[in-house]
Amino acid sequence: MSSSDFGSELLARTLAGVDPDESPLTHKSLIHSRTASFTDWPDWVSAPVRQALSDSGVSRPWSHQVAAAEHAHAGRHVVLATGTASGKSLAYQVPILNRLLKDPRATALYLSPTKALGSDQLRSVSSLLAGRKEFLHLQPCAYDGDTEPAIRQWAREHSRWIFTNPDMLHIGILSSHARWRHFMRGLAFIVVDECHHYRGVFGSHTALVIRRLLRIARAAGADPVVIGASATSGSPGAAMSRMIGAECAEITEDGSPHGARTVALWEPAFIPEVTGEHGAPVRRQAGAEAARILADLVLEGARTLCFVRSRRGVELTALSAKRILEQVDPELAPRVAAYRAGYLADDRRALERDLADGKLLGVATTNALELGVDISGLDAIVVAGFPGTIASFWQQAGRAGRRGEGSLVVLVARDDPLDTYLVNHPEALLDKPVEATVTDPTNPYVLGPQLLCAAAELPLKEAEVDAFGARELLEDLATQGLIRHRKAGWYIAPGVEPHADVDIRGGIGGQVMIVDETTAQLLGTVDTGRAMSTVHRGAVHIHRGESYVVDELHLDDGLALVHPEEPDWTTSARETTLVEITDVLRTNTYGPLTVALVRVDVTHQVVGYLRKLLTGEILDSVELDMPAQTLSTRAVMYTLEPEALEAAGVSVGMFPGALHAAEHAAIGLLPLVATCDRWDIGGLSTNLHPDTGLPTVFVYDGYPGGAGFADRGHEAFDIWIRATRDAVSHCGCESGCPSCVQSPKCGNGNDPLDKAGAIRVLNLILRELPAGAEALDAPAP
């Protein structure tokens, strides 16, 4: 069988027995194989480095590897943005090893967003150097949360190449940088791996952490070069330049080979005679469908990764696949496992080894295995729900076919507007350029705490304050007594220790510990801002395949008490939301339509939760009494004059349902134009908002100060609304379902919703935008 037929044959076997008229397949494409573009190593690459590479099987490099290495060797910041398995690691290993060999004082720092990736890259470097006396003095070493204290001390004193992550860099290195003075003095290179992953609040924090690292290194006398490695992404050079605050070259031409890939888009069918909220039809859940596909592929002997959006979903998908296999071929059930962040380090390493050597045939995973862990020879990838960005989709898809052979990639749509849109508009996924990452390092809620950390490390000079545009922010911090201004610069106030108070992953308001009260075991943590909607009394919590129900939530003590239980239902919080406009940043008016970017205060209160059977049916609604929370953030907002709505066929009585449905659909489709997840954003619709006096819809960032998502929605408003209209109007349901206008996070229980009214609202907006009838008729790109 040729490599181009392999994926198609796997897909055909998976669909065996399915009535063609009822096939869940909406699209199938073949991505043809690509041959390699080789070149020679530059003269500056030393003989020991060449020999090590040759002995590891790399006799000649690919063209993009040399292009990136040349920039780094010449002292220019560079980002290499090419596909999965394109050998990006070699592009930074070569200039680093070359420099470390020639300069005995030089050091290097490697950053990855996950410990799994960092460990994998450390293993790769250690394997390359193994048994070579020329490299014995380099001593590459991990320095992360899994590293034992004695090894941390040894690494600090002896290692010349540290492998860590932004979290440990922030809290464990920069906060005590005086102990790292000799390392910082020689810092020649900083590697930022999988840098497309740094987006939103996490990306904004990481950008400022890297800038803090650069200023400390420069103060010690070094001038490090930053080398970024990224999946294919939009404008990688500009994104990296924004991250490090300096010009950065980009290499995007991929010279690596890859085998043929069959890409299948899969829409689960509606479940007969099952209805959800307000009688809406219910599709088979993406996790359940993916579990069946995973089991089928394992039965075919195909080594398969199944990417699932949530930790809980990973556990359920793996359990479901194992149960299917136990009924068909019990010997295969133990060869399926779950993998996600939160496992102990030894458990993660064992799973990685078992997958790499073939002991495991199928693994359900979060994106913990998306980011660069070198697992070769996979035959198939199942993606249970669009992962949020096109960059992540291709990164996950690229995990298969790593031996240059054919492979299969299946995207299974969730019951979600964006997923439904993509599997029915394949060009928007398969033919669209990859997104640019969205970050906003100037967000005061991010910048303020980071400036305090920077001042605690080294006094802030006036030029640095001006570069950040942060003088007003620092003056406010000084008023709070956190920082002091002296002639030589800005100094941290005595007794202020800011590092421990900064959660660079974007958590809100501290942490709540989740504890099994029957054993006193700590299961995990959740930030306070999300605790009320995820671990409220009665909520279902899943940890490592075990199901728990929450008995008590004590916010003041940061504690959620749970007990083991396996109910046949799930929970989703209901909440009320109020939005107050505090500032109008940008506004455009088109006749009866006004579109604006605004600052808002959003007040949430969890008032209860729904219990749903695993089929999606509503079991009951339970009331809760929880405190209100206020979030200051940014929103994209539009208003419509009532007369225009009525002229478009939306009567006054239809306003609430039509606007509410349009809001839900827009939230679901915002990730099409901004690198976010629908859980990163929220919304509100009202037929008469007190601040506008008009029918108004808000879509806001779910992080203090904003994360850049609303800004991107405002910039791409016409594309976003056109795609939203298409998603709703093309959905096969009659009056609205989770694939178009219902939301799993709606605080009002998806009531009221008017699908037909939403289509009229969205068509009205498109008519009034500058493109007018052209925007109305054109499909979304």
Image (cartoon, rainbow, N blue to C red):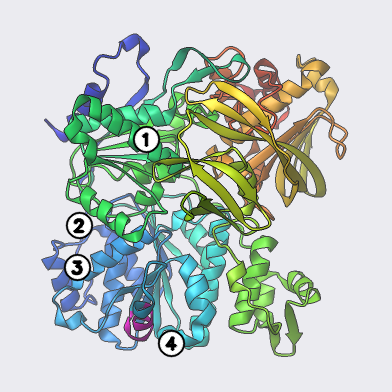
Local crowd at mark 3 within 10 Å, few (<14), some, or many (≥20)?
A: few
The rendered magenta stretch, by its main secondary structure, is classed as helix
Residue 17 in percent (x, y) is at 25, 14
Residue 7 is covered by the magenta coloring:
no
Of the two numbered discs 2 and 4 on the same chain, state the one appearing first in sequence: 2
Q: Nearer the viewer, residue 364 or 544?
A: 544
Q: CA distance from mark 1 to mark 2?
A: 41 Å
The secondary structure type at the circle numbered 4 is helix
Splitting the image into 4 quarters, where does residue 193 fall?
Answer: bottom left
Q: Magenta segment range?
A: 152-160
Q: CA distance from mark 4 to mark 3?
A: 27 Å
The secondary structure type at the circle numbered 3 is helix
Of the two numbered discs 4 and 3 on the same chain, state the one appearing first in sequence: 3
The residue under label 2 is 38
The residue under label 3 is 127
Of the two numbered discs 3 and 2 on the same chain, state the one appearing first in sequence: 2
Q: CA distance from mark 3 to mark 2?
A: 23 Å
